[in-house]
Image: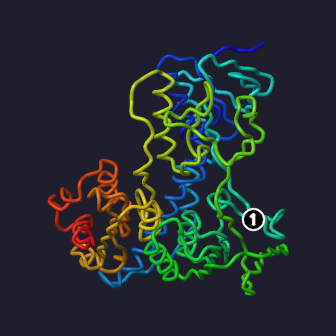
Amino acid sequence: MAETVDVVVVGLGVGGEEVAGRLAEAGLSVVGVEGRLVGGECPYWGCVPSKMMIRAGNALAEARRVPQLAGAADVRADWAPVARRIRDEATDSWDDKVAVDRLVGKGVTFVRGWATITGAGEVTVGDRVFRASRGIVLGTGTEPAVPPIDGLAGTPLWTNREAIEVETLPASLIVLGGGAIGVELAQVFARFGVTVTVVEALDRLVALEEPESSDLAHDALTRDGVTVHVGVKAAEVRHDGGGFTVNLSDGRTVSAEKLLVATGRRVDLSKLGVDRVGLDPAARSVTVDERMRAADKVWAVGDVTGHGAFTHMAMYQAGIAVRDILGQDGPPADYRATPRVTFTDPEIGAVGLTEAQARAAGTRVRVGTGQVPSSSRGWIHKVGNEGFIKLVEDADRGVLVGATSAGPVGGEVLSALAVAVHAQVPVETLRHMIYAYPTFHRGIEDALRDLH
C-alpha cells in the first residue's frame, strides 16, 4: 500500500540533503532516498577530502620554499597522515551515520535504496511506494565519465573515488584529463613523490578558463615535476597486471603503475523512470526553469541540472527549490556570476564570462590584467607568488561581466570580483574604492588601471 507524504527527495547529495532538511524543518512530511552516502560526492570523494590532500601537498611545497626565505628545511613526505585524516576526520571511513542522524533529526524519513519514478508523484524504492502530494525533487548528481578508449574497459582504473581512498601511493600515475580534478590531483600526488603524467586531449589544461590560467597551471605542474601532454588523445590502453601503458594519438607511449580517469562527469537518468513525468531518460541533464522546476510537481537541483558540478551551485539551487515548494518569495536563478576555483597552487579562481565567451556573446570588451608578482604583496611573498588578476568589462555598460583571480589565495581574492560581477558594480565605482595595503586583493587596482 502506498505511503502518502508531501515531498520525496531522490538523491541526497548536498543539494538534495539541503532541500529535504529544510522542507522537513518547515513542517512538511519528507522522504529522502539515497542509495550511496548521504551528503553525496563532496564530503566523501570530492571537495572535502581532496582539499585535505591539497592542504597537505601545499604544506610540503611551502616547507620546500624555506631555503629561499628563511633558512633551511628537511622535508620528508609521508602519505599516511593524509590518508588517516581523510578516514578519521572527513569520511568516518565512508560511513554516513552522522549525516543520516542529522537528516532524521530534522524530521526527514530516510530510506536507503535506489528510487524509481513509477507515476506522476509516485516513487518506488524496493517494496515501498510513496505518493508525494506536493511533488518530487531530483538531486541524483553525476558519476565519473569513462571514455570509450580501446582497452580501457575492465581495467583496474582509478576515478576520483579510488584516488581519494588510496592508502599507499603508487610509484607512478597517468592522469587522463587536464580539467580541475585532473590538475589538482596530479599536483598533489607529484608533491608526495609520485611520478605523474597528465594527458589532455584539448590544446591546454583547464581549458574552460582563460588561456592565461592554462599557462599558469601548466607551469605550476611542470615545476612540481609533472609531465604534461596537451593536444593529444589516449588512443589505446593496455594493462598487464603490473601497470598501464597508454598509446597516444601522436605515436608516443606513456606507462605508469596506476591510471586515473578524470575526463569529466556524466548524468545517468536511464534507471530513474523520468519518462513517467515527461522527461527524457537519455538526456545529458535535467532542464530546469528559473525556479528549479523540471516538470509539473518535479524539481531538480545540483549536478543533474547541468549548471556546473559545484557544491555551491547545488546549495544555491536548493534554496530556490525550497522557496518555490513552500510558496515563498525570492529571486529566481541567476547564473551570471557563477564562481569556480581550481585549487592548484597557485589557486585559479574565476567568475562569470571569460574574455572569449564575452566576445562570442557580442559584447564590446575591455580587458585589464595585473600581475601578482609585481604587486606589493606579491613582491613581499616572493617564492610561490605566481599569478594574475584579469578583468573582463562590458565597455558599453561599464561593468564587469567576468574576472579571474589566480595566485596564492586566488579563490579568496575572487570574492570581491564575484560581488562586482553579481551586483553589476560600475567599474568607475571600483576605481574609487579603498583597497587595503599590502594585500593580494589590492592587485585588482592594477587590473583596473590596465583596462583597455
Q: Say which residue appears at 49% left-offset and 45% top-offset.
A: 313
Residue nearest the observer in this picture, 211 or 139? 211
Q: In the rendered picture of this protein, how many numbered marks are placed on residues? A: 1
Q: Say which residue appears at 67% left-offset and 79% top-offset.
A: 232
Horizontal side of residue 178 vs 259, given as left or right? left
Residue nearest the observer in this picture, 230 or 81? 230
Residue 143 vs 253, above or below: the answer is above
Residue 263 vs 73, above or below: the answer is above
Q: Say which residue appears at 52% left-offset and 50% top-offset.
A: 310
Three-letter code for the amino acid on which mark 1 is drawn? Leu
* Quadrant of image for the N terminus: top right
Horizontal side of residue 13 vs 125, given as left or right? left
Residue 339 vs 114, above or below: the answer is below
Q: Position of residue 79 (x, y in %)?
A: 57, 67
Residue nearest the observer in this picture, 318 or 386? 318
* Quadrant of image for the C terminus: bottom left
Q: Quadrant of residue 158?
A: bottom right
Q: Position of residue 343 (x, y in %)?
A: 47, 63
Residue nearest the observer in this picture, 234 or 30? 234
Residue 396 vs 224, above or below: the answer is above
Q: Position of residue 73 (x, y in %)?
A: 39, 80
Question: What secondary structure is found at the residue carrying circle 1?
Answer: loop
Residue that label 1 marks: 157
Q: How many C-alpha atoms fall within 10 Å of the one at disc 1: few (<14), some, or many (≥20)?
A: some
Horizontal side of residue 124 vs 333, given as left or right? right
Q: Position of residue 48 (x, y in %)?
A: 51, 52
How did the renderer colour the structure? rainbow
